[in-house]
Amino acid sequence: MEEKDFIQLLLNPKTQNEAFKKLLLDYQRPLYNHIRNIVLNHDDADDVLQNTFVKVFQYLKSFKGDSKLFSWMYRIATNESITFINQKAKRSGLTSEVLQRKLVENLKADSHFEGDEIAFKLQKAIAGLPEKQQLVFKMKYFEEIKYEAMSEILGTSVGALKASYHHAVKKIEIFMTKD
């Protein structure tokens, strides 16, 4: 089915419920993984995912089709995740960078974290990166999102994304090889 036809099903009150169920079925897992990569905590990721789908449903009628539906939803999920982290940091009286490091430290106790010591060390390395480099690295490395799609999601040029990824990889390599 063409994306524009699917969007029409989502907007039509008669077909909306079934279309939205399909949207949830198709995008729930990848969006959860994307959000989880940013917020790190399973319960927080579930909350942000729910907020993301509420916003998707709420703003679907204003979707202009300038980008793919996937990119638009990922942009919402990314913004919701960043907002969530910033609000959580503010409530805790921390900077978002300090909160990210605390969240990584809490991963070992998270029953949903399936990584070993190397995966944990990688998460610590990522937490030390600037926010934009974290996002770009996680989207490219964990989710294998192409730079063109990432450009639509983050509203950044492909060249800038490649540079951010390159800098992130270099910093992570240094972190991973020390000790």
Image: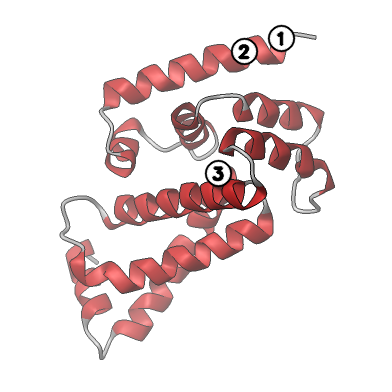
What kind of element bears circle 3? helix
Give percent across and percent down for residue 120.
Answer: 75, 32
Numbered disc 1: secondary structure: helix
Q: Quadrant location of residue 58?
A: bottom left
Q: What x and y, as percent, mark residue 28?
A: 50, 63
- Identify residue type, mark 1: Thr
What residue is shown at x 54% (from left), y 52% (from top)? 87
**Residue 107: horizontal and vertical position, in percent?**
76, 43
Q: Identify the disc placed on residue 137.
A: none
Does the rendering let one see residue 34?
Answer: no
Image quadrant holding the C terminus, namely top right
| Relative horizontal placement of residue 170, taking residue 52 as reference (left or right) | right
Mark number, residue 177? 1
Q: Which amino acid does label 2 sit on?
A: Glu
The residue mark sitting in front, 3 or 1, is 3
Residue found 43% across the figure and 48% down from its top: 78
101 above or below 37?
A: above
Among the two numbered marks 3 and 1 on one chain, the one whose residue lies closer to the N terminus: 3
Identify the disc placed on residue 38: 3
What color scheme is it?
secondary structure
The CA span between labels 1 and 2 is 6 Å
What residue would you read off at disc 2? Answer: 173
**Residue 84 visible in the picture:** yes
Seen in the image, is 22 located left or right of residue 169?
left
- How packed mark 2 is, by other alpha carbons closer than 10 Å (few <14, some 14-19, many 20 or more), is few
**Residue drawn at (67%, 51%) of the image:** 41
Of the residues under marks 3 and 2, which one precedes in the sequence?
Answer: 3
Q: Distance between the residues labelled 3 and 2?
A: 20 Å
| Residue 54 vertical position relative to residue 104 in the rendered view, above or below | below
From the top left corner, tell me how far across and down residue 36 is, in percent: 59, 50
